[in-house]
Amino acid sequence: CRLFIAGRHSQERLVQYLSVIETLNQEDRRLVHHNLANWWFTNPTTVNAFYSASTNQIRFPAGELQKPFFWGTEYPRSLSYGAIGVIVGHEFTHGFDNNGRKYDKNGNLDPWWSMDSEEKFKEKTKCMINQYSNYYWKKAGLNVKGKRTLGENIADNGGLRQAFRVCTAMFAVILQIKL
């Protein structure tokens, strides 16, 4: 078998070709020599979507597509759409919460917000911290720690807001179709 590369930019093509071959070989070696249990960040049957700031990715395991988050055909689709919408919106919002906002689009710890944006964010989060700190959890006999739960509170509010926006937009389309 011969490899023949000629013409303009032939040297660059050869380097690219060899780079692709090396990448494929590395992947093959990884598959053969490594424990594949750690290949995925989580078991696909896990019922816990999550956001990874260091990779700037949402992980949505197949386990999320079952009850109670995915209701199945015996229930109205709106329950599944709403549940999945809130979960996806929640995880997406983590990219902009008190931790995720510190990472850039490539997952590098590199603050990218303007000073003005950071100040406005801090103002709004103070309000949220105070609001949640005033919630009394009767079963535990104490108040919620608003500062400690801030990231989840931001994500919960963002997820619910995004799901509501999608729902509102869908109703607007449905109403136009029926008219």
Image (cartoon, rainbow, N blue to C red):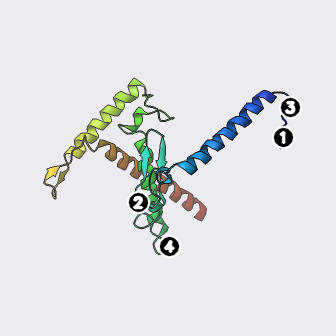
Closest to the observer: 134 or 175? 134
Q: Count the marks: how many? A: 4
Q: Amino acid at mark 3?
A: Ala
Question: Mark 3 or mark 4, which has the lower sequence index?
Answer: 3
Q: Quadrant of the C terminus?
A: bottom right
- The residues bearing labels 1 and 4 have C-alpha atoms spaced at a distance of 56 Å
Residue under the image location 45 percent in, 58 percent down:
84
Q: Which residue is mark 4?
A: 73
Q: Where residue 74 sits in the image (x, y, percent)?
A: 47, 75
Q: State whether residue 179 appears in this view.
A: no
Residue under the image location 60 percent in, 62 percent down:
177
State the mark number for residue 47. 2
Q: Amino acid at mark 2?
A: Val
Q: Which residue is mark 1?
A: 2
Q: Is residue 33 left or right of residue 14?
A: left
Residue occupying the far left of the picture: 141
- The residues bearing labels 3 and 4 have C-alpha atoms spaced at a distance of 58 Å
Residue under the image location 49 percent in, 67 percent down:
77
Tell me where residue 127 sits by quadrant. Answer: top left
State the mark number for residue 6. 3
Q: Amino acid at mark 1?
A: Arg
